[in-house]
Image: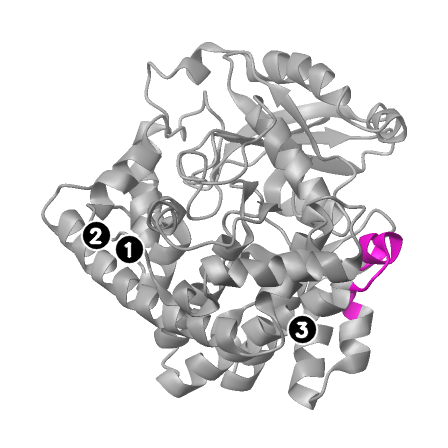
Amino acid sequence: MPQNDTIEQRFESGRALRREVPRASHSDVGDVKRDPIKLLEASSAGRVEPLVPLRYGRMLASPFAFYRGSAAIQAHDLATTPHSGLASQICGDAHLMNFGGFATPERNFVFDINDFDETHPGPWEWDVKRLAASFTVAARHMGFSAAVADEMVFTAIDNYRAKMAALANMGALDLWYQKMTFEYMLQNAKTAAGRKQIAKAIAKGKTRTHEGVLPKMATKTDGKWVINDAPPALFHVHSKSTLMKADDPWKMMDHLTTVGKSLKQYLATLHPSNRQLLSYFRMQDVAFKVVGVGSVGTRCGVVLLTDALDRPLFLQLKQAVPSVLAPYVPVGKSAYKHEGQRVVVGQRMMQSASDMFLGWLTGALGYHYYVRQLRDMKFSAEIEMFSEMLLGRYAWLCSDILARAHARASGLAPEISGYLGKGTQFAEAIVGYANNYADQVERDYKVFQEACRKGRLTARSDADFAADRSV
């Protein structure tokens, strides 16, 4: 859209899109006549083979866990759903657990999207639909009624509409500076229970520092820090605890040497001042780290560095593979051939503040990675502890953050707001979508359970892996 049009003209261009794509059409779940197992198997290709059963084991825990790990399936389904044609940088995996708290470089606590592995240009509606369905699936998992889930989703999506309208009338700098701080949330919490949860989150975040995690993750031996093996979550590639096959290419390398060389390339992607800061640290150890649900089996490492006072810095190297959206997006293509750069640039565009050590590199074997701090005052919501009211407030908060991220990254807030309008048609349609897609998730989950039960897929839990190592 030409940016020299007036705001009213841009609103009107968004309104005009309703004639081509009615807002009520967004309840459509798309083409779901597919084999979910084939899509899962395709998304597991290229991962560390012995860890794929752990991925499936974690997804087997519940329909909600399955939903978290199956972004590739929903990407396929979304490809045939209606969209306004307004392309934005989107998160690509905006389910409710991919929002959380972390500290900015200035050490202020903010709440924002915190996972961008799948970020890619695409229809902004896809993020909205993945978020909405995640709340319906989670509400069912937690035993909340359909009426509660519907009200939760409706309120959140109507807030997305209202937030986008406010952002459309905001100056560019004001929009870019917007942050959701925990201090603001604490001051504006409407209930004692809400204030208690926010205060608890702040207190928890303050304990999740590099120094706090050091004695839990590493041991100093002969003057050198060594990361503790704790399979399946954490292990050295060459140790007895390794979960890698003997012929895995990673087992052929000296990781301290190769990672050290790769980090030199990574330094070029940082701001010069952060590059200077990192020069004060020396590498101590490197280990393989298993992360998340959907990312299990991708090649991820944790690097322990220390400064002259033996103070630690943990960096995470996370493999960046093509976004699950890439084969399906009808509008917008990524400008970046390096998948790590795609993740980093998307994160910097959408987040209100990003990790000062966020960067990317290509490993010795040609794998693409992005780099960030590990656990530096980061924390996620413990939604299992939430009441209906608190989960509803959390849904509202996530929709608020998502609207800001879309407005910031796309520059299309007036057009999106014009399309959404002042009524409730879009929110009502998304409630319908969330219910319809939650039904589909439950059907897919049963197919997944059956595939694991009959041996088409092998699923193993963290406890299974740990038990193998203790024998």
Q: Position of residue 298 (x, y in %)?
A: 44, 32
User: From the viewer's perspective, is 463 left or right of 167?
Assistant: left
Membership of 423 in magenta stretch: no
Q: Report helix, strand or loop for mark 2.
A: helix
> Mark 1 — residue?
60
Magenta residues span: 169-182
> Mark 2 — residue?
448
Q: Report helix, strand or loop for mark 3.
A: helix
**Kind of residue indicated by mark 2:** Phe
Query: Could one spot residue 246 in this view of the protein?
Result: yes
Residue drawn 55% across and 85% down?
389
The reply to whether discs 1 and 2 touch (Cβ–Cβ < 8 Å) is yes
When asked about the image quadrant of residue 468, the answer is top left
Residue drawn 77% across and 49% down?
353
When asked about the image quadrant of residue 29, the answer is bottom left
Q: Residues within 10 Å of mark 1 (few under 14, many from 20)?
A: many
Q: Is residue 89 above or below residue 327?
A: below
